[in-house]
Image (spheres, rainbow, N blue to C red):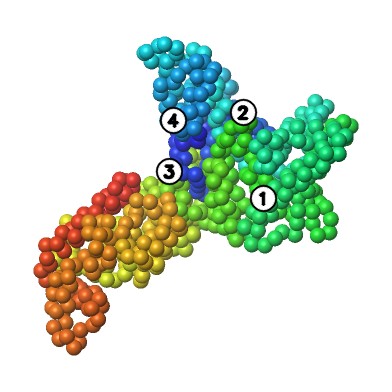
Amino acid sequence: MRYTKFRFKNFKGIDDLEISLTGDVTTLVGLNESGKTTILEAIFCFSYGSENMDAINPGLESLRDPEQWIPISQRANFNEPILISATVSLDKADKASLKAHMKREHSLTLTDVPDEITIKEQYKFSNSRSDGASRVWDLTIQGLKGQQRNTRKYGAGSDEWQGAVAHLKQALPRIWYFPNFLFELPERFVLTGLDSLDDEERDRSTFYRAIFEQVLGEQANDANLATHVVDRLDSKERADKRSLEAVLLGMSRSITNTIFDGWNRIFGRAPIAQEVQIQADLENSAAYLELQIKGPDGYYDLSERSLGFRWFFMFLLMTSFSGTRTGKEEQRPLFLLDEPASNLHSSAQAELLKSFETLTERCSLVYTTHSHHLINLRWLDSAYVVKNEALGSLAFDEYFNAQVGAKTSISAAPYRRFVNDNPTQTSYFQPVLDLLDYRPSNLEPIPHAVLVEGKSDFYLLRYAHEVLGVGDRCPAIVPGTGAGTLAPAIGLYIGWAKPFILLLDGDKAGREQLERYQSLFEPALAGRHALLPELCGDETAIEAESLLSEVDRRMIVEHVFPDESTRPSAKKAVSQGVMELYASNDKVELEPSTVERLERLFDSLQQMLDEQSKQAPNSDPS
């Protein structure tokens, strides 16, 4: 089960906003004060999903107070409802689990399980005071019992419907919100005797116990702290003591490998600290765990290490072991990261971005940033540009002159739509431009284009269309200097959200480079690439010259180079001949088979560009 969409109304500075989580990673880009953090807070305030993290970040407790969500401009007398809505998708395993639960608990054979469920939480207010909340599940339950032949629907008041909701509620992915990772890991946390602790220490111990349950679970799915640590601490048997030592050693190694392997990936070097050591002991009959960092000259508490080390330690600990196990069920949690690593240097940010790819193997991720070091072009299709109307449509140098007292109104538009609708408001997506290291003029035309391998492709296609009149329309052709040279151009077109097609030859080099570009730019490249034989409908036409029939190739060479003694080599003669025909506007008659291939190619290219244009409403085809 995973979240696919959120919608918010009247939440702080949000009037009405919908955000779709179409990929594993959703990036929120925008200026300071644009509202990126507000969107993360709104997601976290979906009560069914949010993980209670007050123990490590007490400030989050007040965030869940509905009266804190009232828009500032309406605090004097607010009487409107606030809406937080989440849509989740169910995969085959989710559906099978629900069917099994309903059969086991309610003797009901479900005949239909929806692909998506929307849950709406509405909070009422009267005179700026909270006045209750309602929660509505858009869920239809229908099935058969016993010898029934006709399917029956079960409404919200039935035990069956309530049972289905209770099961789904437990299966909802947890939402973890990390405004930062600078909270402290306690020197020790208690495993037993929690009732004797004050509320704050009890909550903190409970929270970290859950984290270390999952650390232990990395060694064996059925392992738990109560049986494999606490009971063995109480035991006098030597075998139990040795087993306990093995468990603690395994947990220490698990965290050591996770933290320091991650550190090495991010920084390219080993940290001064060398090892994490976990110990367990009893004090006043209460069991506790203690974590220390081993360095070259002794043991340290985490609080004694540098700010950067503490940030990464907690980031890797939380994201590697949080939220994945609930009993025997596997979950895919949603992590919300607000300006991660904003206080660290650029190379660390760039390597952190790479680590996100590994992180998404086990979770979904929404993060905010205004650093180009934390932008991945491959994720632009699922990125949003966040804008606050109070800041206006300003250039970057006008940012600090924004209107004081203007009404906050936060919006979020898919990156490609925002760039097409607001091409001059580059300050809002400046991090992407910084990543591209490109500063085009606001007046510079960026047509829909076909990126081709080289000048041979360019001149043949331009000659066929412009001089011979083949094809109703021909997009702009942008040549590279070889199949492997098009990455910068691909990056620019992705960054500017302009429709384009990567057209490569069907030979070995073209196919290999296509795989490379896919590894660099997918999913942003999906639907924007093709091999020449696929579009012209002739599997033998693997390169531009082979679009021409053998007769046409010979005819062009003889027409341009009548003197055989001055004629270039065969392949070069064809490409050079086409170039000279184009430059001189000299028409020759091509065979019908050649014209058919070219027309089919032009039609296919235009269809692909038209399909992309449907997703870019203000993009004018050239």
> Compared with residue 85, is residue 280 higher up or lower down, i.e. above or below?
below
Circles 1 and 3: CB distance less than 8 Å? no
Q: Which residue is mark 4?
A: 116
Circles 2 and 3: CB distance less than 8 Å? no
Q: Which picture quadrant has residue 55?
A: top right
- Marks 4 and 2, Cα distance to the nearest angstrom? 28 Å
Q: Which residue is mark 3?
A: 413
Q: Earlier in the sequence, mark 4 or mark 3?
A: 4
Dot 4: what SS? strand
- Amino acid tagged 3: Ala
Circles 4 and 3: CB distance less than 8 Å? no
| Neighbour tally class for label 4: few under 14, some 14-19, many 20 plus, Cα within 10 Å | some
- Marks 4 and 1, Cα distance to the nearest angstrom? 35 Å
Q: Which picture quadrant has residue 202?
A: top right
Q: Residue at x 67, y 45 (%)?
A: 317
Dot 2: what SS? loop
- Amino acid tagged 4: Glu
> Compared with residue 420, is residue 199 higher up or lower down, i.e. above or below?
above
Q: Point out the image quarter for the C terminus.
A: bottom left
Q: Which residue is mark 2?
A: 65
Dot 3: what SS? strand
| Neighbour tally class for label 2: few under 14, some 14-19, many 20 plus, Cα within 10 Å | few
Which is in the foreground here, disc 4 or disc 3? 4
Image mark count: 4
